[in-house]
Amino acid sequence: MKLIVGLGNPGKEYENTRHNIGFMVIDEYLKENNITNSKEKFKGIYYETNINGEKVILLKPQKYMNLSGEVVREYINFFKIPTEDILVISDDLDMELGKIKLKLSGSCGGHNGLRDIEKNIGTQDYKRLKIGIANNKSIDTKDYVLGHISKEDLEVLNESIKKGAKIIEEFPVIRFDNIMNKYN
């Protein structure tokens, strides 16, 4: 069983914001595959699907970004998912807009959602898909990541969101280092 977590903040006011790029990737995959069977558990909305014979849970934590780790930990414990079978999708301020990067493990890089996941699961050894949202230094970081994405930026990000949905499709069936070589 695989767990794919898209990070974001719950609520209408956070839709179409840079910090919700993880939710957007999950939503794109769901739309492309006509998956609508949402369930709720442990303060998360999740979808169960099967990709090439592998059971996959797609999770959108419904706690704020900096508390996502509590939700992820509950799913790991309940479904007994090893950390090597987890992929977390998040935004990254330090990468150019629309650039994607896959990582096997590493530090949170200052991302509060990833920091909370690491604190709650006790390791940095989980896979990540990071999508660059750039960093407008003229805007306070909090206002920037929680600000709505302009039409122009969304056009750039839509390509990355579609690649993210493709990575979700490949994660359960292709060795991660091969996926990394393909997309990094």
Image (cartoon, helix red, strand yellow):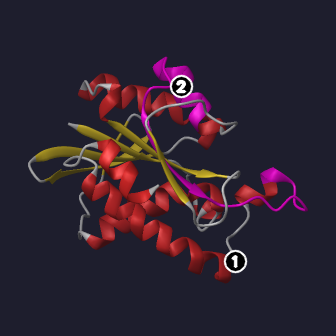
Query: Which amino acid lies under the numbered mark 1 shown in the image of this protein?
Result: Ser
Residue 8: x, y in percent? Answer: 55, 51
Disc on the earlier residue, 2 or 1: 2
Gap between marks 2 and 1 measured at Cα: 31 Å
Q: Is residue 128 magenta?
A: yes
Quarter of the image for the N terminus: give it. top left
Q: What percent of the width, then of the height, locates residue 19?
A: 63, 55
Asked if residue 9 shows in the view, the reply is no
Q: Give the residue number, with chain letter if any, for mark 2.
A: 118
Label 1: which residue? Answer: 150
Q: Residue at x 66, y 39 (%)?
A: 111
Residue at 41%, 61% in the rendered image: 164
Q: Secondary structure at mark 1?
A: loop
Q: Position of residue 174 (x, y in %)?
A: 22, 48
Among all residues in the image, which is located at the extreme left? Answer: 53
Name which residue lies at 32% across and 71% down. 31
Q: Which residues are magenta?
A: 114-142
Q: Is residue 169 left or right of residue 22?
A: left
Mark 2: few/some/many CA within 10 Å (<14, 14-19, 20+): many
Q: Amino acid at mark 2?
A: Glu
Number of marks in picture: 2
Could you tell me if the residues under marks 2 and 1 are in contact, i.e. CB atoms within 8 Å? Answer: no
Residue 176: percent from left, percent from top: 32, 43
Residue 111 visible from this viewpoint: yes
Crowding near pointer 1: few (<14 within 10 Å), some, many (20+)? Answer: few
Location of residue 156 with respect to 147 vertically, above or below: below
Q: Nearer the viewer, residue 177 or 2?
A: 177
